[in-house]
Structures are given as structure tokens and as C-alpha cells.
Amino acid sequence: MRRITILGATGSVGQSTLDVIKAHPDRFQVEALTAARNVERLAADAKAFGAKLAVVSEESAYGALKEALSGSGIEAAAGPQALIDAASRPCDLLMAAIVGAAGLAPTLAAIRHGTTVAVANKEVLVCAGELVMAAAREHGAKLLPVDSEHNAIFQVFEESQRDAIDRLILTASGGPFRTWTLEAMKPVTPAQAVAHPNWSMGAKISVDSATMMNKGLELIEACHLFAMPADQIEVLVHPQSVIHSLVGYKDGSVLAQLGSPDMRTPIAYALGWPERISAPVKKLNLYEVAQLTFEAPDPVRFPALRLTREALSAGGAMTTVLNAANEIAVAAFLEGRIGFLDIAAIDEAVMGTMTGAKAGSLDDIAYIDGEARRQALARVDGKVF
Ligand code: NAD
Ligand code: MG
């Protein structure tokens, strides 16, 4: 029996993780589940899966959680420290599926306990990749990529042949506005932006997919997870989302992983690793798909990729800045406070004001992250970017 803790259990990845666990009652048991504030879902799942602990990060939701779990024997806790404590409890695998840099502290806590971490929460690596990777090396914590592209690469990346690998190719669906002009993208609503053509996901990553910032964040994520320089990582638009990513070897071979666009495949790969286990997904039918097509990303309509490459080459803490500004800008767009194209404009403006930001420690990162959020909020409020 493998004991699993899920951070962000009530979200899209968290729920898909529970789906995979449900299909293997003889293999997995749930240790702890956490959420921001969705008490109803969290309590129902904690009971259904026999979790030992349920945590809400929102302190004000504690009373409701305690009441919902009364008589069940499941421990209830709340607040940021409770989240860290939950992640520090011994388990065989922790699924990091919180959205945003809010997942950094608990994910790092698990890593520092040497726990195997399945990483869906890409912002953790964008915000503090060097620190996180160093902690994983120091504490012998294995990181298993869950993001479908990185999971695909992980499946075909022969570590023993690392010297023979000359490039990674990240595929991108192009999002709902792949073929739209800038003019047409200007007035899009949050509802239009979160309606992804292939994947069903949380609101933040859906907006990131629409701006293609998601691919930029994934580029940074890939640099850290696979210790590859950004100039050896290409982005290829592939609207069908069937080839999840590719690894190019110096003899000209290119290996890819294919599958239906369903997160339960990469999640099952991570939960079962190094074994393969079944997943409750629709089998890929290439005859039905019929065509796999490819395009180059358009840097004019989608500036996000350029911004991430600039952040990576600036080095220091610029990816921390980019991530923080983007989290604020996406939230403001979802609240109807700024337009769709303003997201990248705010990201770029905040990066411009924070050149030279350096981060040696977690405290530095927290400071820079906070400062970038303040800068971004000032731009949202003042409508100047
Ligand atoms: P989601 O919004 O559906 O769920 C987020 C989860 O995190 C929820 O359980 C929520 O309660 C919790 N949460 C939110 N804010 C929190 C906070 N401040 N403190 C503690 N908990 C908080 O998001 P999602 O789509 O499941 O994505 C989760 C992560 O996985 C993101 O980093 C995303 O980029 C990544 N990811 C998602 C998918 C996907 O298909 N959804 C695919 C690849 C990667
Ligand atoms: Mg992805």
C-alpha cells in the first residue's frame, strides 16, 4: 500500500488524482488532503477515501471543516502552518497540486523530509526552481513530473544517455485563441479564455494556456526538471494535444509520448512509478484523431514565450518576478478588472522595474515575490502598464 497526500485535493489535478486512486483501492491509501476553502468537497473526499487528516489553508473555514468531519475520526486543521505540517507527515508520495506560488512552502517541506513529490504545481519551480532542485538533491527527494509535457519527456528521457540528448520539444495546443488576431483577442471575456479546446483545467492555468504563458512557465519548469538550458528547448504548436512532448537525440532520433488529453494518464504514471498502472482514460484512437498538425508559435500575438526566455536569460530572480506578476494579472483578468492583452503587458512592465533582483534564500524569494505582486497590483489599480 502506498500512502498518498494530496495538496490541492479539491482542484482539477487533485480530483483527477483521486480518480486514479479510486481505481486502485488495493494499491493506494490517502494520508492527508488539503484545499484552500472548499470544505464540502474536501470533507466528502476525506471521508470517502479514509484520509487521516484534512486541512484548509483558509483559517476562517476551520469551524465548517471541523463540523463536517465530526464523528468521522478524521483530524481537521487550518492555516498555512497546518498545510506545511500536513506536507511534512510521512507518506510515500505527495501530489503537489496547489495552484500558484502558494504551494511553495508546503512542497518544500515535503522535499526537505525526503518525500517523493509528484509535481503538478509548476509555479513552485518557476518561482524558486534552483532552491527547490537543490533541496531535492540535498534531501534525496525524487521529483516526478506530472505536467503532461514534462511527464511525456520524463517517459522518453533516457537519463543514462543524457549526453546524447540535444533538445527537448514542448508541444502546445495554442489555446482557444490560437488563430485569433490581436484585435479579436482584445475584448475576450474570462469565460471565453477558460474554455480550453482540449483540456479541462483550473481557471488560472486555462487563462495561462490562452495567453500561452503556460508554455512559458513550462519552459522554465523543463529547464529545472531536466537540467537543460533554455536554448535546447523548443516549443511546437500542436493543436490536437495528442503528442505530449518529444526528446531529440543527437543521432537524429526523436522520441515522443502520445495519449488522449487526459491528466489521469500522467498522474497514473507518477503514482505508479516506476511501475505502470492502469488509468481510467479513453484509449487513444489515432484513426479518430486522423490528423496531427504542427505550427510555429507566433511571438507577436503571444508575447509570453518571449517574456519567459527574457526572464530566463536575465537570471537572478526574474522568473520569480514574472510568476508573481502573472499570478496577479491573471487573477485581475478573471475578476474583470483588466483586459486579456493587459496580462502580458503587466508581466512585462513589472519585469522592467525589477531588473537585477537576486535571490539566494527563501526569504529573498518571498521578498521579491511580494514586491512583484505589489508592483503588479499597482498597475492593475492604476491601469498603467
Ligand atoms: P485548480 O484551481 O483546479 O485547483 C487548485 C487547488 O489548490 C484547489 O484544491 C485549491 O483549493 C487549492 N488552492 C488554491 N489556492 C490555494 C492557496 N492559496 N493555498 C492553498 N491551497 C490553494 O488548479 P488545477 O488546474 O488543478 O492546477 C493545479 C496546478 O497543477 C497548477 O499549478 C497548474 O498549473 C498545474 N497543472 C494543472 C493541469 C490541469 O490539467 N488542471 C495540468 C498540468 C499542470
Ligand atoms: Mg502542461
Image (cartoon, rainbow, N blue to C red):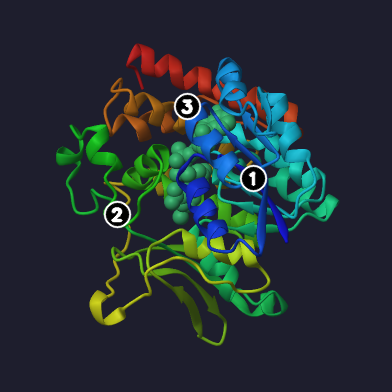
- At 30% from the left and 20% from the top, the residue drawn is 337
Q: Amino acid at mark 1?
A: Gly
Q: Nearer the viewer, residue 258 or 329?
A: 258
Q: Earlier in the sequence, mark 2 or mark 3?
A: 2
User: On residue 350, which mark appears?
Assistant: 3
Q: Quadrant of residue 167?
A: bottom right
- At 47% from the left and 76% from the top, the residue drawn is 256
- Up-down relation of residue 107 to residue 39 (above or below): below
Task: Determine which residue is flagged by label 2.
Answer: 298
What is the residue that sits farthest to the top in this orientation? 382
**Apparent side of residue 219 relative to residue 274 in the rendered image (left or right):** left
Can see residue 323? no
Q: Earlier in the sequence, mark 3 or mark 1?
A: 1
Tell me if mark 1 has few (under 14), some (14-19) or many (20+) residues whose alpha carbon lies within 10 angstroms of its own: some
Q: Secondary structure at mark 1?
A: loop
Residue 36, x across and y down, in percent: 54, 29
Q: Earlier in the sequence, mark 1 or mark 2?
A: 1
Task: Determine which residue is flagged by label 1.
Answer: 50
**Apparent side of residue 251 relative to residue 335 in the rendered image (left or right):** right
Foreground tag (3 vs 1): 1
Residue 4, x across and y down, in percent: 67, 51
